[in-house]
Image (tube, rainbow, N blue to C red):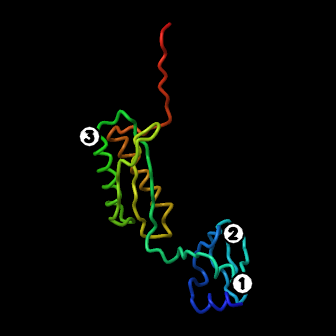
Amino acid sequence: MFGGVAILTDKPFKVGERIKVNQYDVHVKEIGIRSTKIVTMDGTQLTLPNSMIANSVLENVSKEKARRIITTMGITYNTSHTKVTQVKKILAKIVVENKDTENTYEVSLFDFGENALQIRLIYWIKNLNDIVRVKDEINMEIKKQFDKAKIEMAFPTRTVYMKKG
């Protein structure tokens, strides 16, 4: 009961908001004195005791102002330094020119992977209802610009050296 009172007085979330609590990513359907009814992303309804919610780390996803997206892509090892610099400029331009993203971004040659130079792009999507659409737009534009600039995306490869007898 104390958990319900704490939730009703502290108001860490309200009905209709999306929260993450324990392993659950859910929408709040109803808040009661003893329990809170939630709906999972798959549409399943759960009832959680308020004492469990009150004693858990809770993330109110509905309160985020923008969604951070982290994308890592591999380009081939034979990509020149000049082309890597061009890749970084292309990615920055794509993010800045998209009206649904914040102008804040990070682009880096992140790692020397097993099969590719790993480029990491971090950006933020403003409208949380359009995340899938905006990610698709960004990804399609990356593919289009890479094709146009003849930048090769990497895929797992092996080089085998054979020694003659």
Q: Disc 1 marks which residue?
A: 35
Give the mark, 3 or 1, whose residue is nearer the N terminus.
1
Give the mark, 2 or 3, whose residue is nearer the N terminus.
2
Q: CA distance from mark 2 to mark 3?
A: 49 Å
Q: For mark 3, give the secondary structure.
A: helix
Q: Is residue 32 left or right of residue 157?
A: right
Q: Amino acid at mark 2?
A: Gly
Q: CA distance from mark 3 to mark 1?
A: 59 Å
Disc ID at residue 43? 2
Identify which residue is drawn at 62% across, 75% down: 27
Q: Amino acid at mark 1?
A: Ser
Q: Disc 3 marks which residue?
A: 82
* Label 1, residues with CA under 10 Å away: few <14, some 14-19, many ≥20: many
* Label 3, residues with CA under 10 Å away: few <14, some 14-19, many ≥20: few
Identify which residue is drawn at 62% across, 91% down: 8
Disc ID at residue 59? none
Quarter of the image for residue 150 reads top left
Q: CA distance from mark 2 to mark 1?
A: 18 Å
Q: For mark 1, give the secondary structure.
A: strand
Q: For mark 2, give the secondary structure.
A: loop
Quarter that holds the N terminus: bottom right
Q: Amino acid at mark 3?
A: Thr
Q: Is residue 49 left or right of residue 122?
A: right
Above/below status of 99 relative to 6? above
Pair 2/3: label in front: 3
